[in-house]
Amino acid sequence: MTQTLLRGRLLTFHRAPQSGDDRAAYTYLDDGGLLIADGIIRDTGPFDTVRAMAPDTPVTDHRPHLMMAGLIDTHIHFPQVQVIASWGAQLLDWLNTYTFPEETRFASEAHSQTMARAFFDQLVTHGTTTAVAFCSVHKASADAFFAEATRRNMRMLGGKVLMDRNAPDALRDTPRTGYDDSKALIADWHGKGRNGYVISPRFAITSTPEQMAMAQALAAEHPECHIQTHLSENRAEIDYTKELYPQARDYLDVYQSHGLLRDNALLGHAIHLEPREIDALADTGAHPVFCPTSNLFLGSGLFDHGGLTARGIVNGIATDVGAGTSYSMLQTLNEGYKVLQLQGQSLHPLQAFHWATRGNAEVLGLADRIGTLDPGSEADIVVLDSAATDAMALRMDRAGSLAEELFVLQVMGDDRAIAEVYVNGVSQKASHAPQRSRPP
Ligand code: GUN
Ligand code: ZN
């Protein structure tokens, strides 16, 4: 058994902070210790206490940096690594002009494998240790995604998108092939290593009612699998959906009437909701996912986090690369703060960092495994440097509290603020480049 002891400042959440003063919602230690063995956090506490339990274990000292659970991204598109930063369009034009042509390239196994390596490199570089990803329509893209996740021992969720209309020929499956490929992928990957399969009807516009019925069958046969799709992101999308599904009471009803709403269902965007849709989200426990950089980039609208939360709905937060403009969950929290500011909702930094860690883990039903530094959790850890740039260091000179430091990380931080990442207890810097030595 290989043991490691990490030393540093330490922050972990026990529940969502009700306010900035909600001290019981988290543990913060100025000098913390994390004892890791075989990919699991075995002990968490003041360094001296943890040290006493493991006197001979080698120590990696991350002081003065801050150790937190690895960041979790609950909505991202793997085949869009070369779509990010495509100019000038709103959702439907953006899909047709940039995204669909690019996704056709993932028919190639070799291209999918090359892009999977690049995609996972970006996640790790930005401190993201778990993501929920849409692959392309091609089975090869999902095979490449899960093979790479397995190679890196990362807890990853994903699925091939189901799409059988309103897309180029090379990007369409059929109700039958979509079902069969999803079944094969579930058999090959779900529960293997740290992988989870996600049943992924892309959105109402690209699936016929026949395909939605097949998604319903998949969902019923695999209650253990998550479901992901898109909901009410853009006005033109909503109008077209209502044309395509005239019998649906509203957009959400397309999914609801096909049995796709449950507490492990994730609905990207969920911006322009009607009262009945909000009731249905609250009743089913399905989770909207807020994608602020994407919503601003595509001009989609402002997500009503406060309004949905007041109804007892638990929202995820995510990058949505490639409509999202950064892989960084720190930058996602930054833009999220601004979107909420525009609606008079102030996101406190403690709530923000809870959201990107334990909050997203709870949305996924995985808070017993990821999202905290509790003993028994998987050792996915990010080490944050709040003085990573000169501008941050200058601001940090005047920061007097943990909350202020977190807000500097949130507003000014990006991949440069990620000092180290551990995946399943393994240092990602050490496995890619020599680690900087630090004085004891
Ligand atoms: N709706 C359907 N597909 C997509 C996608 O790839 N990105 C975004 N932002 N919205 C979508
Ligand atoms: Zn998306």
Image (cartoon, helix red, strand yellow):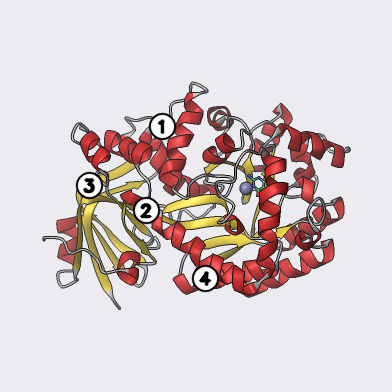
- Give, as a three-letter code, the residue at label 2: Ala
Query: What number is the disc on residue 29?
Result: 3
Residue 25 drawn at (x, y percent): 36, 39
The residue that disc 4 covers is 148
Q: Residue furthest front?
A: 87
Distance from disc 1 to disc 4, alpha carbons, whole Å, reads 38 Å
Is residue 362 visible in the rendered image? The answer is: yes
Mark 1 or mark 4, earlier in chain: 1
Residue 38 image-quadrant placement: bottom left
Q: Nearer the viewer, mark 3 or mark 2?
A: 2
Residue 125 image-quadrant placement: bottom left
Query: What number is the disc on residue 195?
Result: none
Distance from disc 2 to disc 4, alpha carbons, whole Å, reads 22 Å
Distance from disc 1 to disc 2, alpha carbons, whole Å, reads 20 Å
- Give, as a three-letter code, the residue at label 4: Glu
The residue that disc 1 covers is 18
- Give, as a three-letter code, the residue at label 3: Leu
The image quadrant where one finds the C terminus is bottom left
**Label 3: how many residues lie within 10 Å, few (<14), some (14-19) or many (20+)?**
some
Mark 2 or mark 4, earlier in chain: 2
Distance from disc 3 to disc 1, alpha carbons, whole Å, reads 20 Å
**Label 2: how many residues lie within 10 Å, few (<14), some (14-19) or many (20+)?**
many
Is residue 191 visible in the rendered image? The answer is: no
The residue that disc 2 covers is 69
